[in-house]
C-alpha cells in the first residue's frame, strides 16, 4: 500500500494523511501497510511542528474497506496468523498513543466504506467525522468471513459505544449508516463530503491541548436517556453477566452453534471487559489464528471471493458493452412483480411501467413501492426529494400504453405456459426490435416460452427469488437462440438491481429449481419412511439450512410445489419422482401458509404454530418412528448435491463456482459449507461417491452418482 501525500500545513501544524492503495479501487489492509504506516507515525511522533493529524482517504467514496482478503488466504498456520495480528495491534496502539500519550489529536475523516480493519483504524482516533453519503457505512463484518475483528475491534468498540451496541455490530456483521452510527456515539459529526476535510482540520485545531475527554467523544449523544438503562446494566458485574448471556442466547439461536467466529468474538469481548484490554487483545490474536485457518472461514471466504468476482463478470466472457436500460416494463403486480418493480426503481434507478389486469392490481404495486420508499426515507437511506423522484419514475396501466419504448420487459405472472406465450406475443407486437423480454418463471423452459417468438434472440429468463428486495441472487437463463447482447444486458441490469447474477443454460428448472426438487422430494421420502415433520426440519436446520424442507413447502405453497414437481417429473422421469403426497394435501385443501392449512398450524393472522398432527392422517401414513438425524441429513443433502453435479456435467452451469453461489444465495445452502461443490471437495469426492453408492443400494437409482462425480473421484480432480 502506498500512503500518498501526507502533507503538512506549516501555519497551523495539522498533518493531512491520505491513504491510497496503488492500483486498487478500494483501500484495504495487508502487510504492505505496516511499513508505510510505521514511517508516517515515526514522522508525526518526532516532528514538533505537527500538532494534530487528519487521517482520510485519497479515494473518493472509500475510506478503508477492511483486510485484504487475498492476504488472509496466505495464512495457513494459526501461530503465524496470530503473530501478524500482534504486529497490527502494536501499529494501531501507536496511532492511539499519538493523542493519548503525545497529545496530538487524530481526527478520522470518513467518506465511504469504513469496514473491518478500516473501522478498527478509525477507532484509534480521538474523533471520527463522517460524510452523510449513501456510500458511507461503518461496520465489523468479519464474522461473515468466519473470523473476528482482530485489529482491536473487540476491545475498542465496546469502550466507545457500550457493550450491547458493540456486540450487535460484531456478532451480526451488520454495518451502520452514518446517522445510526452518530446516534450510538460511533461517529462524532456528520458533514457533507464537500467540506469533510475542512471540518476535520478545524476540529483537529480545536482539539489541540484539549484531549481530556478523548475516550468519550460523542459522550453527550451516548448519555441520552435511551442509553441509560443499557449503561446501568453494563456497569455492574451482575448486569454484564445478564447482558453476555442474552447475547450468547441470541447468537446461538441464529447460528445454531455452526459458526465458530461469533462465539469466539463474544468471548474476546468478555475477556477484555473482565480481565482488561491487554488480555482481550491477546485473546483476539489467538482466536484470529484459530479461526482464519478453519474450514468454515475458508468456505465463507470462497463465497465472498466468488460473489466479488461476479460483480465484474458480464455473463459472456469477452463480449462488449450491454445495451442501456432506462425504461422497464413489468407484467404482473403480485408479490414477485411488485418486488421486481421496487428494486428496478429504487436500486437500478430505471423508469418502470407496470401492467396489471385491473386498476386495484396497479394500485397494489404502487402502494408496495411507496411503502418501501417511505421506509428508505425514514431510515435516511433516501432524502425526501429522492423518494419523490423515485415514485415519479413509476407508473401503472391496464393496457399496453407506455410499452413501445421499453428497453426491457420482465414478465412475472402465474406459471402457465399458455399465458406466458400469449404475453410474449403481445409484447413483441407493441415493442421495438431491441427490446429484451425476460420471464420470471421458476421452472418452465424458456425455449418453450419462446417457441412461437418472432424475436427469439431477445428472449431469456430472469429468475428472481422471494422476497425480491432481500434475496441476493438472480438467475439469468439463456436458450440456444438467446443473443449475447441480450444476455449481457440482462446481467448488467440485474447488477444494477443489487443482485449477484449467475448465467445458466435453459432447461426444466434451470439450476436452482432443478436441485431444489430432489432435495424436497427426498424429504418427503424420509417422511414416508416414518420420520416426523419436526425431526426432518430440525435435522436440516441443524445441518445449516435456514429452514427445513417441510416448512419450506408450506412457505412456497404446497400446490406450487406440486405443480413444479410434475414439470420436473415429466422432464426427467422417475429420478425426480417423489411420494404421492402433494396431491393428497391439495385434495385436502392444504396449500401451506397462504391458506393457513399445511404441515404446520397457522392462526388467523398467519402466525405459525406447531405441526398439524392431522396432516399424517391426510397423507394416509402411519405412526412415526425415529430415523437417525445423520441419516436424514445425508439423504436430503446428497440428493441436492448429486443433482448439482449433473447440472455441471450437462453444461447447465458455466462453472462449479456458479453452482456454489446459486445454491448458497438462492436456496440457503449452508454458507459455512461453501456450496455443493466446495463441500464435495472438502469431504472428498471419492467419499461422496461411496455414500451415494450405499444410498443407491438401499433406496434406489435416484441416488446413482452423477458420472462427473465418478470421473473426478477416479482422477482425483477437484471442482474448485
Image (cartoon, helix red, strand yellow):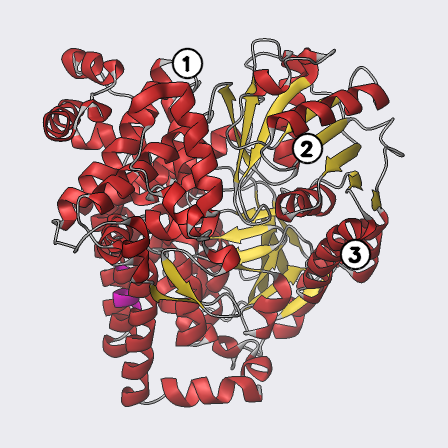
Q: Earlier in the sequence, mark 1 or mark 2?
A: 2
Which class describes the residues within 10 Å of circle 3: few (<14), some (14-19), or many (20+)? some
Residue 290 rendering spot, x and y as whole percentages? 20, 50
Does the magenta portion include 532? no
Name the secondary structure under disc 1: loop
- Give the residue displayed 13% in from the left and 22% down from the top: 686
How packed mark 2 is, by other alpha carbons closer than 10 Å (few <14, some 14-19, many 20 or more), is many
* Residue 566 picture location, percent across and down: 43, 30
- Magenta region, mostly helix, strand or loop? helix
Q: Nearer the viewer, mark 2 or mark 3?
A: 2
Q: Which residue is mark 2?
A: 411
Q: Which residue corresponds to mark 3?
A: 387
Q: Which residues are magenta?
A: 264-269
- Front tag of 1 and 3: 1
Q: Quadrant of the C terminus?
A: top left
* Quadrant assignment, res 692: top left
Nearer-N-terminus badge (1/3): 3
State the CA–CA distance, disc 2 to disc 3.
Answer: 25 Å
Question: Which of the labelled discs sits on residue 651, or is there none?
Answer: 1
Amino acid at each position: 500500500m502506498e500512503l500518498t501525500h501526507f502533507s503538512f500545513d506549516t501555519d497551523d501544524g495539522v498533518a493531512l494523511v491520505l491513504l491510497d492503495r496503488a492500483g486498487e479501487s478500494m483501500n484495504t489492509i495487508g502487510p504492505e501497510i505496516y511499513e508505510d504506516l510505521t514511517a508516517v507515525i515515526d514522522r508525526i511522533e518526532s516532528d514538533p511542528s505537527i500538532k494534530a493529524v487528519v487521517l482520510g482517504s485519497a479515494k473518493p467514496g472509500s475510506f478503508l474497506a477492511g483486510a485484504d482478503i487475498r492476504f488472509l488466504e496466505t495464512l495457513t498456520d494459526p501461530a503465524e496468523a496470530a503473530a501478524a495480528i500482534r504486529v497490527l495491534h502494536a501499529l494501531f496502539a501507536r496511532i492511539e498513543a499519538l493523542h493519548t500519550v503525545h497529545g496530538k489529536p487524530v481526527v478520522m475523516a470518513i467518506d465511504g466504506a469504513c469496514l473491518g480493519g478500516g473501522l478498527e483504524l478509525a477507532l484509534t482516533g480521538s474523533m471520527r467525522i463522517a460524510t452523510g453519503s449513501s456510500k458511507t457505512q461503518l461496520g465489523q463484518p468479519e464474522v461473515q468471513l468466519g473470523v473476528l475483528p482482530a485489529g482491536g475491534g473487540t476491545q475498542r468498540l465496546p469502550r466507545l459505544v457500550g457493550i450491547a451496541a458493540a456486540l450487535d455490530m460484531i456478532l451480526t456483521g451488520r454495518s451502520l449508516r452514518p446517522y445510526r452510527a452518530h446516534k450510538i456515539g460511533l461517529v462524532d459529526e456528520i458533514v457533507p463530503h464537500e467540506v469533510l476535510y475542512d471540518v476535520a482540520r478545524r476540529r483537529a485545531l480545536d482539539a489541540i491541548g484539549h484531549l481530556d475527554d478523548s475516550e468519550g467523544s460523542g459522550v453527550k449523544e451516548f448519555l441520552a436517556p435511551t442509553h441509560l438503562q443499557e449503561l446501568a446494566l453494563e456497569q455492574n458485574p451482575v448486569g454484564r453477566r445478564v447482558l453476555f448471556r442474552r447475547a450468547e442466547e441470541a447468537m446461538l439461536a441464529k447460528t445454531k452453534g455452526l459458526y465458530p467466529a461469533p462465539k469466539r468474538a463474544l468471548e474476546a469481548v468478555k475477556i477484555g471487559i473482565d480481565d482488561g484490554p491487554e488480555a482481550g487483545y491477546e485473546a483476539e490474536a489467538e482466536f484470529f489464528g484459530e479461526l482464519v485457518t478453519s474450514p468454515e472461514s475458508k468456505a465463507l471466504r470462497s463465497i465472498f471471493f466468488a460473489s466479488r468476482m461476479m460483480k465484474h463478470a458480464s455473463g459472456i466472457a469477452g463480449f462488449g458493452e450491454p445495451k442501456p436500460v432506462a425504461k422497464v416494463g413489468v407484467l404482473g403486480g403480485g408479490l414477485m412483480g411488485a418486488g421486481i418493480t421496487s428494486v428496478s426503481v429504487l436500486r437500478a434507478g430505471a423508469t418502470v411501467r407496470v401492467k396489471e389486469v385491473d386498476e386495484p392490481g396497479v394500485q397494489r404495486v404502487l402502494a408496495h413501492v411507496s411503502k418501501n420508499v417511505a421506509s428508505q426515507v425514514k431510515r435516511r437511506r433516501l432524502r425526501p426529494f429522492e423518494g419523490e423522484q423515485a415514485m415519479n419514475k413509476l407508473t401503472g396501466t391496464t393496457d399496453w400504453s407506455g410499452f413501445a419504448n421499453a428497453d426491457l420487459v420482465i414478465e412475472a405472472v402465474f406459471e402457465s405456459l399458455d399465458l406466458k406465450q400469449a404475453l410474449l406475443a403481445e409484447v413483441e407486437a407493441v415493442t421495438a426490435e431491441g427490446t429484451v423480454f425476460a420471464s420470471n418463471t421458476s421452472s418452465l423452459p424458456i425455449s418453450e416460452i419462446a417457441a412461437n417468438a418472432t424475436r427469439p434472440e431477445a428472449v431469456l429468463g430472469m429468475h428472481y427469488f422471494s422476497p425480491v428486495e432481500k434475496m441476493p441472487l438472480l438467475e439469468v437463463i439463456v436458450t440456444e437462440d438467446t443473443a449475447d447482447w441480450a444476455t449481457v444486458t440482462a446481467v448488467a441490469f440485474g447488477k444494477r438491481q443489487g443482485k449477484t447474477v449467475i448465467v445458466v443454460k435453459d432447461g426444466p428448472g434451470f439450476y436452482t429449481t432443478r436441485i431444489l426438487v430432489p432435495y424436497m422430494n427426498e424429504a418427503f421420502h424420509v417422511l414416508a419412511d416414518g420420520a416426523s415433520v419436526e425431526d426432518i426440519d430440525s435435522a436440516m436446520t441443524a445441518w445449516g439450512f435456514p429452514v427445513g424442507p417441510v416448512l419450506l413447502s408450506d412457505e412456497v405453497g404446497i400446490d406450487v410445489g406440486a405443480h413444479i414437481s410434475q414439470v420436473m417429473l415429466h422432464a426427467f422421469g422417475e429420478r425426480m419422482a417423489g411420494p404421492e403426497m402433494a396431491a393428497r394435501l391439495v385434495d385436502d385443501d392444504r396449500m401451506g401458509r397462504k391458506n393457513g392449512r399445511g404441515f404446520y398450524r397457522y392462526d388467523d393472522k398467519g402466525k405459525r404454530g406447531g405441526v398439524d398432527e392431522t396432516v399424517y392422517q391426510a397423507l394416509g401414513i402411519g405412526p412415526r418412528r425415529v430415523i437417525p438425524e445423520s441419516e436424514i441429513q445425508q439423504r436430503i443433502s446428497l440428493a441436492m448435491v448429486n443433482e448439482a453435479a449433473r447440472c455441471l456435467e450437462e453444461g447447465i452451469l458455466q462453472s462449479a463456482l456458479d453452482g456454489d453461489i446459486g445454491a448458497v444465495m438462492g436456496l440457503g445452502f449452508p454458507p459455512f459449507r461453501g456450496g455443493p461443490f466446495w463441500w464435495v471437495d472438502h469431504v472428498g469426492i471419492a467419499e461422496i461417491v461411496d455414500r451415494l453408492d450405499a444410498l443407491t443400494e438401499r433406496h434406489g437409482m435416484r441416488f446413482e452418482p452423477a458420472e462427473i462425480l465418478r470421473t473426478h473421484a477416479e482422477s482425483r480432480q477437484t471442482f474448485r
